[in-house]
Image: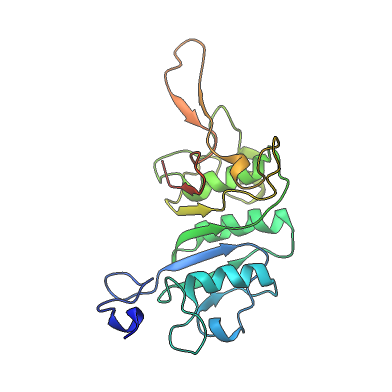
Amino acid sequence: LEAWDAVTGAQPGADSQGTAVGVAVVDSGVYAAHTDLQGQVASGSGSSEHATGIAAIIAAKHGNGGISGIAYGARIYSYGANDNLITRIAGVIAAANQANVKIINLSWEQFTGENNDLKCALRYAAFSSATPISTPDLNCGPMLTALNIPVTATGHDKLIVAAAGNGYEPPNPVNTPRNIVDHSVATSGSGASQTYHRYPCSWSELVVCVGN
């Protein structure tokens, strides 16, 4: 008896009503025609082995002779192309705007440094619907304006799961996405009383970012 066949109720990756949970894979493009993923990819496509492997770990079909994803009742939304940071930033924004997406997976390595657009995109996705994206410590106005998003925009309450980072060689720090995690900055000066969070994450070996 396999454990998969003993599961009762909703499939792993489906909500209590049996509806598939949308998981965005922001990487380099999921190969939607792969045998393990046929019917599992709701939108987007590509040819990246890495992105396809990540998608399969999440939601590969159960009972097709291949592997079963840990949340095979979920559906994948593929964003990003090649090793292009611009398409990945756009993917985070698009995933945030996709109502069916509840979780956004970031699984790439890239030397982004202090990339404001990526940090603003993560804020847009992960901050709560009551939290402004643009705050005094990080001006997201230019990016939001370029995307025709109001500069007063708030977050979308998405759960973001990100790899801890790749390429670690002591004493150098790991790379994206761990190098963009939260550093809280308390505002200073007359009347300042609020602490702003530059990035919607917290330090961890595995970074799990949630709306704050």
Q: Which residue is at the front of the view, 173 or 106?
A: 173
Q: Residue at coordinates 48% horizontally, 89% vertically from top-left?
A: 64
Q: Pinpoint residue 124: horizontal percent, then vertical percent.
A: 52, 47
Vertical relation: 57 (above or below) 83: below
| Quadrant assignment, res 50 | bottom right
Vertical relation: 134 (above or below) 31: above
Q: Pinpoint residue 15: horizontal percent, then vertical percent.
A: 32, 69
Q: Residue at coordinates 40% horizontally, 46% vertically from top-left?
A: 129
Could you tell me which quadrant the N terminus lies in? Answer: bottom left
Compared across the picture, whether 32 is left or right of 71 comes to right
Q: Residue at coordinates 63% horizontally, 68% vertically from top-left?
A: 51
Could you tell me which quadrant the C terminus lies in? Answer: top left
Q: How many marks?
A: 0
Compared across the picture, whether 41 is left or right of 18 comes to right
Q: Residue at coordinates 48% horizontally, 10% vertically from top-left?
A: 190
Q: Pinpoint residue 187: horizontal percent, then vertical percent.
A: 51, 20
Q: Which residue is at the front of the view, 10 or 192?
A: 10
- The figure's colour scheme reads rainbow
Q: Pinpoint residue 68: horizontal percent, then vertical percent.
A: 46, 79
